Amino acid sequence: MRQTGARSALPVGGRWIQLLAGVICMSMIANLQYGWTLFVEPIDDKHGWGRAAIQVAFTIFIVTETWLVPVEGWFVDRFGPRIVVLFGSVLCAASWALNAVADSLLVLYVAAAIGGIGAGAVYGTCVGNALKWFPDRRGLAAGITAAGFGAGSALTVVPIANMIHSSGYEATFMAFGLGQGLVVFALAWLLVAPPSAPLARGGFAAPPAQRQYTPSQMVRTPVFWVMYAMFVMVAGGGLMATAQLGPIAQDFGLAHAPVSILGLTLPALTFALSIDRVLNGLTRPFFGWVSDHIGRENTMFIAFAIEAVGIVALSLYGRDPVAFVLLTGLVFFAWGEIYSLFPACCADTFGSKFAASNAGLLYTAKGTAALLIPFANIIADATGSWHAVFLLAAAVNALAAVLALFVLRPMRNRMAAGSLDARSGRSVTATP
């Protein structure tokens, strides 16, 4: 049923409750991506399928999580966020429950596809809803929401690792899958779409009227494809680190090396995963807030350049346990902001009316980037080290930084100028 009633008045708690519910939902699905690396070695130890074959499941998850978000966004834009998140919560729980009993690669791949569809439904809905509720603070709102996904697994890294060690990865998949799914299912009932004109009553100012691009209109603009290419470049390096951090630590001989920082001692891999999740979450609202003040492209240039430097440093110094922990943290901090900067930039450029669908189309770039993940293993096996993989990831980040300032910014400026009516100076709204 279309949520027309939900659009007539502000919900209890206003837009901040909507934001909070979205953040918690995102944190509950974060382990489907960021906790995966903890399961790769245990699965391989039991079944002997090989890392490359097991990591195909991760690629399938990312592809289905991203490439179907535009379809899910279409439902959100028309029927509201609640039904889509309810649907996603069931699939997320079912995915990890199926992982728990998977006795073949085929079952593992099917579970990955189910989980990807469910996670994409939750992710795309929550980000799109934040963009609609916060047109005056898009960078910050998208960043806070995406932070739930980036940092949501930080609190559960140690419990998951401990449970895998004590009870096996199968029981861990089952317990955390069902628990996370139930929390998302409950919170979905709080989610509603914003009223048609809530801005004055809600106490925050709307941005100037602008052309509202439908998804089909958006994909016909060159600026969309420049954003898409940049997204693929930066996401590729970050996803490689996300999926391969466990194997990289194993190959560096650091997985169980003790690391002490600020009085806390943990194995290097566990320490890195915990810090990485926190920084990967903090970077999203931080750089989103920065971009609200200094501009999207300027912020992209700074973040992508830091990412390139961090990856090179990790390649050179990452075999030291402390350096491994700190440098992976820097890499994740300079990578996670893409999930706030690109949705905000998309809504700035193409309007908020179809924000869920449009941001979902742009988000498919993450799925395209995921297709590159297996090649990281191939390159590492062929060269005998991760050095070439790191250098390639650093190079594409540096290229994306240059594109942000010298290609994307001029194109967006020309597009914004062209959308003004030459006679009246007023914005023109596209006909859907």
Image (cartoon, rainbow, N blue to C red):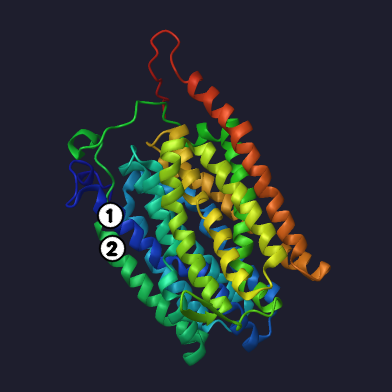
- Residue 164: where, in percent of width, then height? 50, 86
Q: Marks 2 and 1, how far apart in space?
A: 7 Å
**Left-right relation of 50 to 81:** right
Q: Relative to 410, say whether 138 is above or below.
A: below
The residue that mark 2 highlights is 187
- Residue 425: where, in percent of width, then height? 40, 13
Foreground pick, 417 / 185:
417
In the picture as drawn, the residue positioned furthest to the front comes out as: 262
Q: Residue at x 54, y 37 (%)?
A: 297
The residue that mark 1 highlights is 191
Q: Relative to 234, say whether 167 is above or below.
A: below
Foreground pick, 73 / 334:
334
- Callout 2: 10 Å neighbours few (<14), some, many (20+)? some
Q: Secondary structure at mark 2?
A: helix
Q: Relative to 351, say whether 188 is above or below.
A: below
Q: Amino acid at mark 1?
A: Leu
- Residue 104: where, in percent of width, then height? 62, 81
Residue 112 visible (yes or no): yes
Could you say which quadrant of the image residue 316 lies in? bottom right
Q: Are marks 2 and 1 in contact (CB under 8 Å)?
A: yes
